[in-house]
Image (cartoon, coloured by chain):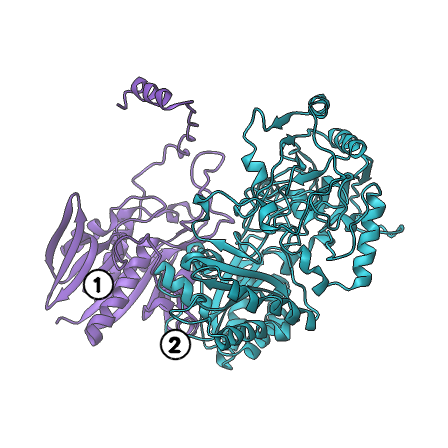
Amino acid sequence: MTPTRLITRAIRRPGLIVPPFCRPVLLRLSGQRFSATESHRQITTTATTANSQKKEVRLTAESYPSIERDARFAKLTSEDVAHFRSICPVLSAESDDLEAFNTDWMRKYRGQTRLVLKPKSTANVSEILKYCNSRSLAVVPQGGNTGLVGGSVPIYDEIVVSMNSMSNIRSFDPVSGILICDAGVVLETADNYLAGQGHIFPLDLGAKGSCHVAGNVATNAGGLRLLRYGSLHGTVLGVEAVLPDGTIMNDLSTLRKNNTGYDLKQLFIGSEGTLGIITAVSIICPPRPNVQNVAFFGVNTFEKVLEAFIRAKRELGEILSAFELMDGTSQRCVAQVTGKTRPLAGEETKFYVLVETSGSNKEHDDDKIDKFLMALIEDETIVNGVLAQDETQQRNLWSWREGIPEVLGHWGGVYKYDVSIPLKELYSLVEDVKARLIEHGLLGEDKTVVDVVGFGHMGDGNLHLNIPVRSYDSRVEQILEPFVYEWIQKRKGSISAEHGLGVAKREYVQYSRGETELGIMRSLKNHFDPVWPAPVPIRASCC
Amino acid sequence: MTSLRILVPIKRVIDYAIKPRVNATKTAVMTSGVKMSMNPFDELSIEESVRLRERNGDAVQDILAFSAGPAKAADTLRTAMAMGADRALLVELDEKRPEEIDLEPLAVAKLLREVVRQEGCNMVICGKQSIDDDSGQTGQMLAGLLGWGQATQAAKVEVQGSEVVVTKEVDGGEEVVRVKLPAVVTTDLRLNEPWGFPISCQRRYATLPNIMKAKKKPMEKKTLADFNVEFRKRLETVEVVEPPPRQGGGKVDSVDGLISRLKELGAI
């Protein structure tokens, strides 16, 4: 299930400021945070600490000494604050607690902003960016602040532009299913509104109660419904954004077809706020399915998992809505930590799969999933399995998938990677990492590393590689990195499937993108934000 | 020990994880287009019957799942058979005839009495209530009609020779009762659940092989006309309303504020 708060917006640095890629400081992306999917709470690469809540969060500037504050950015003055007060509501460090805006929800990143702006309209956002641009003030757009990579909080003293106050649903057309809403509408609010109209938001993730719709768009959130409804690149029909110089780009189209030149809105989807601040989106929302089935089964080899996946697509067809992979280790961890009885009795299998269908006709769906499952078990593609008989069982089965990230933090910490790999080799990464840790004597009952776990959205070629540890240890980190990134590079995979780059992954982008592509990204950033051209190419930092 | 022929009555109700909504005329809860599942207490009954067989082996001769409901109640009975019931009997109610909708507890008890006699059952394990009307009367009425002993709200069931020993939760502890067979036992939430776990946490799932087997198990279908029972309604539903929405709480600024507010409310 699901995640976050997210959000984003774009732009970070907007205005000027910051070039996108990388720049230190001030630029960062936006925030969206959120993540989708892996469940919610996770971080991506790095580790989370079980009791991190109790400790003060370390300043990002200290954790990432390589990111320096760009001296070209101006420092905030009282005249600036007075000017912003004339535009929209303002929170300042002198009179308000800005902790919530400076710290991400995983408590892994902490910035030092002195000012939070809460624009109420697109015009407000335009005025803010125009002024920041002229004054060279760095900006970080922030949505629900649910990202996992540190993209939605400041690093240094960037001004936070919070989209919380722009939260109106502008329109919904029941015939086409197109929703137009402000940037700061919370995903769950949008979905509840749509439920009342018999429709569904084409994106769902664990942070849905906090994340903002525009943050989802700015970070191109993946989530649980991607297999069924596709990515936001397909469902988002239009974007209204404010560019770094304050120009309003009104591309809030409601057309499914519009081949008139470059598709500009696509640039903003997944830009993490580096090109502008998204202020509204239009998105096409399918009718809401009212019948669901959830099955959970055990499989002994990865080849058979692939076979089951192919057959699920063929035999379940349009009702297939999730195909989630979990390895035996992950399920053993959940059972051990939660003490719950495992759904499947008998011998443990190497892999487990959760299949969900969503449709509109119970008899039809029941019949399909029944035949699909029976055929799999009869020809021994799967070893055993269960089919939920009611809503509660469905939720319980999902908890064996969604509960994994939380459970892995039980031993102390977790190193997390969210990667895309061609399906055939999806699981080999887990095996190779495990072999490598064993070879170096780091994995075992009395060793630092508890185990190596793989799970994820099989349907999307997205693997979550998690390595629960008893404590963080630089020896483990050296074994993992850059090994994992190089491994992925060799298979032409992605080092960040759905979490984005943010602060956490910016240094590794070259493992997934070539110099030519990075060069084009830099020139795009320069185009949108000429005052602050992209940084020097080292480390790409894109986005 | 006495060999057991167990009857487990089952009701198809709105899934307990779904929030029920009252219809516009305030005469009933809306059921069309709503997910329906087995009454959770009935699941406990099926589970306990299966566990009795697991513990006592061949002494459990027969587990018959019974339901009186719409044609779709057949799905619910298949679930019961996938969980371990041997066979099923469905009394299909005609939804177009108002007198057949929402049978009252007394009518159901009379129907069950006939089934017990026809099928030669000597133990009935039923839920202490169904979660749609919450009447909680059928088991007791059935025991009365049959002249059998009854042990209600069971948290633990043991068959010893020709007797059943039932542990029930009562205020402040447990009460253990002993009843001679034949008998009616009604099930409470703690039955077959480890203490401390919410209902359904540990309930068995329907496995694929068992679902396949369930398809081949016999399901007999009858109608009310096959029983010589009087189903006249004795209760009139005056109005169905939702509980009042929760009133929002207030905020206090300080500990002193909290204390004075609590005093105002007479809480301390």
* Chain shaded cyan: A
- Is residue B76 something one can see in this rendering? yes
Horizontal and vertical percent position of residue A237: 76, 47
Q: Please name whichever residue, B152 or A136, is drawn nearer the observer in this view of the structure.
A: A136
The answer to whether B1 appears left or right of A126 in the picture is left
Q: Which residue type does callout 2 highlight?
A: Glu
Residue situated in front as seen by the camera: B90 or A83: A83
Residue under pointer 1: B117
Question: What residue is rendered at 16% in x and 59% in y?
Answer: B183
Q: Nearer the viewer, residue B64 or B245?
A: B245
Chain B palette colour: purple
**Residue projecting furthest to the right:** A261
Name the residue: 47% across, 67% down.
A296
Look at label 1 and name its amino acid. Answer: Arg
Most foreground residue, B42 or A55? A55
Q: List the residue tagged with mark 2.
A: A347
Q: Is residue A231 left or right of residue B63?
A: right
